[in-house]
Amino acid sequence: MSGALAKPVMRGMLAKRLRFHLIAAFSLAIGIAATFKFAVAEPRKRAYAEFYKKYDAAKEFEAMREAGVFVSARPTGK
Amino acid sequence: MMASRVVSLLSKRAISTSVCMRGHGVAKVEEYSLPSYFDRRESPLPDVRFLKHLTPEQQSLKAKEKGSWVALSNDEKVELYRISFNQSFAEMNKGSSEWKSVIGGILFFMGFTGFVVLWQKQFMYGEIPHTFSEDWISRQSQRMLDMRINPVEGFSSKWDYDKKEWKK
């Protein structure tokens, strides 16, 4: 046998592929979910919490009323 | 077979039409309805050999194959392989540079579409609605700020209501 090749892989190909892809799939899924949670969801929750800490609904209403956006609460005066 | 023998007894004519030999009006077997050879990674052993008609040397080689395989030389083994198969797995799985042409073609036609769109804007489309005028947009934006559109993270959150200007 001149220049005989190495014996190719005969068994366990599906198992090997499955192992690789299962690990990859789970890590990617969990990683992307975690990234989204900490990059998008948590900051957004904090932003809303901060906004409503100092939110004065009555004051905002009066400001909007004076700007003339309401139909049933027209601006005061005149 | 019996029918053809009866016909030859009754009429002294030789049986020449193939319809008679095959039976009563059975259709001619087309080549494409027979099992075919194919090179495919997912089903490694096709139904038939690659080479249908063997030369006399190949036929003698096939006869030698019936004996002990130790007696076959390496070249004879390769020849037997090539009789049975067209491309080896390495050959059929080999990649090509076709993807470069495909990507190039895609990008080229996307570029061409750009020209088409330019022509359409110039010659086909009419005026855009009046609601896109600068004056309308500015009045619209002011009204959005008055209504406090998206005050937490969106439009109105970028406006400073005390200084009456966009936040830096």
Image: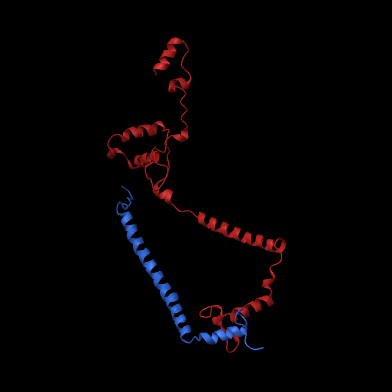
Chain colours: A blue, B red
Q: Which picture quadrant has residue B145?
A: bottom right
Please indicate whether residue B167 sits to the left or right of residue A24 in the image.
right
Image quadrant in which the N terminus of chain B is located: top left
Where residue A8 appears, as percent x and y from the top left, is 32, 52
Q: Residue at x 66, y 78 (%)?
A: B139
A64 vs B164, nearest the viewer: A64
Where residue B162 appears, as percent x and y from the top left, is 57, 89
B87 vs B27, nearest the viewer: B27
Q: Which picture quadrant has residue B127?
A: bottom right
Q: Residue at x 47, y 32 (%)?
A: B30
In the displayed structure, would residue B88 be above or below residue B1? below
Please indicate whether residue B120 sits to the left or right of residue A61 in the image.
right
Where residue B137 appears, as percent x and y from the top left, is 65, 76
Asked if one can make out residue B167 in the rendered structure from this viewpoint, the answer is no
Asked if one can make out residue B32 in the rendered structure from this viewpoint, the answer is yes
In the displayed structure, would residue B43 be above or below residue B123? above
